[in-house]
């Protein structure tokens, strides 16, 4: 019993001693201003996020992507060329223009509209032409990326010409990838015997 009491006293004495020598640590501040989620996701009026921009421009986006506005563009070769001509070099394109282009690439794939196939043929032909004649790698990649979503088997030769004529290795690789994706998407699946995308 004496040994247990002595041991308990020793432990208590050690704990009391430890409390006295425990150093006080002040608040540690991280020098990285983006170390927390709050700082990282705080709104920046000079560099708005896509979500913030879309919310602020919702009326303009809705007007630009209305069926009437998009139909007016895809109904005219001149209007299509004009829209695609507004694509600028890296990150300089008006977001409304980029949104309209993406919306048209989606619209021409509509399976419920009997006008969609003709509009798709006109649209993808213009995208191929724009990719072939684009003055820089960024724009070539932009147009090729749209073709990933709406390209047809008939566009493969034009896409391949982008791969053959571009001096940029990344563009060549991407063009080949897009061509392969279109080939896969327009080929009949082994299990269902239906086209994957068309």
Image: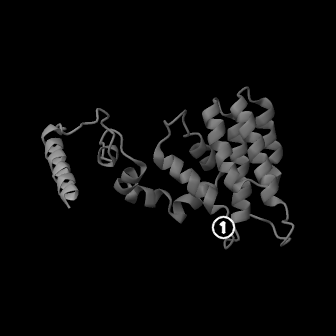
Residue nearest the observer in this picture, 154 or 194: 194
Q: Locate the C terminus and report the quarter of the image it occupies.
A: bottom right
Residue at 71% of width from left, 71% of height from top? 114
Q: Which residue is mark 1?
A: 110
Element marked by disc 1: loop
Quadrant in which residue 108 is drawn: bottom right
Left or right: where 190 falls relative to 108: right
For this rendering, which residue is in front, 48 or 142?
Answer: 48
- Choose top left, top right, bottom left or bottom right for residue 118: bottom right
Q: From the top left corner, tell me how far across and down residue 124 is, in percent.
A: 71, 51
Residue 64 placed where, x, y %? Answer: 48, 56
Dot 1, crowdedness within 10 Å: few (<14), some or many (≥20)? some
Q: Quadrant of the N terminus?
A: bottom left
The image quadrant that residue 4 belongs to is bottom left
- Vertical position of residue 17 compared to residue 5: above or below: above
Q: Is residue 36 above or below residue 186?
A: above
**Where residue 160 sits: x, y (%)?**
81, 40
Name the residue rendered at 84%, 60% in the picture. 187
Q: Residue furthest front?
A: 2
Q: Residue 98's x, y, as percent?
A: 53, 47
The residue under the point 76% across, 36% down is 162
Q: State the residue in front, 113 or 10.
A: 10
Question: Which residue is drawn at the image coordinates 30% and 46% (left, top)?
Answer: 43
């Amino acid at each position: 019993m004496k040994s247990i009491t002595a041991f308990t006293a020793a432990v208590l004495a050690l704990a009391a001693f430890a409390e006295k020598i425990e150093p006080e640590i002040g608040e540690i501040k991280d020098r990285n201003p983006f170390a927390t989620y709050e700082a990282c996701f705080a709104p920046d009026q000079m560099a708005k996020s896509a979500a913030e921009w879309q919310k602020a421009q919702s009326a303009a986006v809705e007007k630009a992507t209305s069926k009437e506005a998009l139909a007016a563009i895809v109904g005219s070769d001149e209007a299509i060329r004009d829209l695609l001509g507004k694509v600028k070099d890296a990150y300089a394109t008006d977001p409304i223009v980029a949104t309209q282009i993406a919306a048209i690439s989606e619209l021409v794939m509509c399976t419920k509209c009997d006008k969609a196939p003709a509009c798709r043929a006109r649209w993808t032909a213009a995208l191929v032409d724009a990719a072939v004649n684009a003055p820089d790698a960024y724009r070539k990649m932009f147009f090729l990326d749209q073709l990933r979503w709406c390209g047809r088997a008939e566009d493969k030769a034009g896409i391949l010409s982008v791969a053959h004529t571009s001096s940029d290795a990344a563009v060549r690789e991407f063009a080949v990838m897009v061509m392969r994706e279109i080939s896969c998407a327009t080929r009949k699946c082994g299990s269902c015997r239906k086209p994957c995308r068309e």
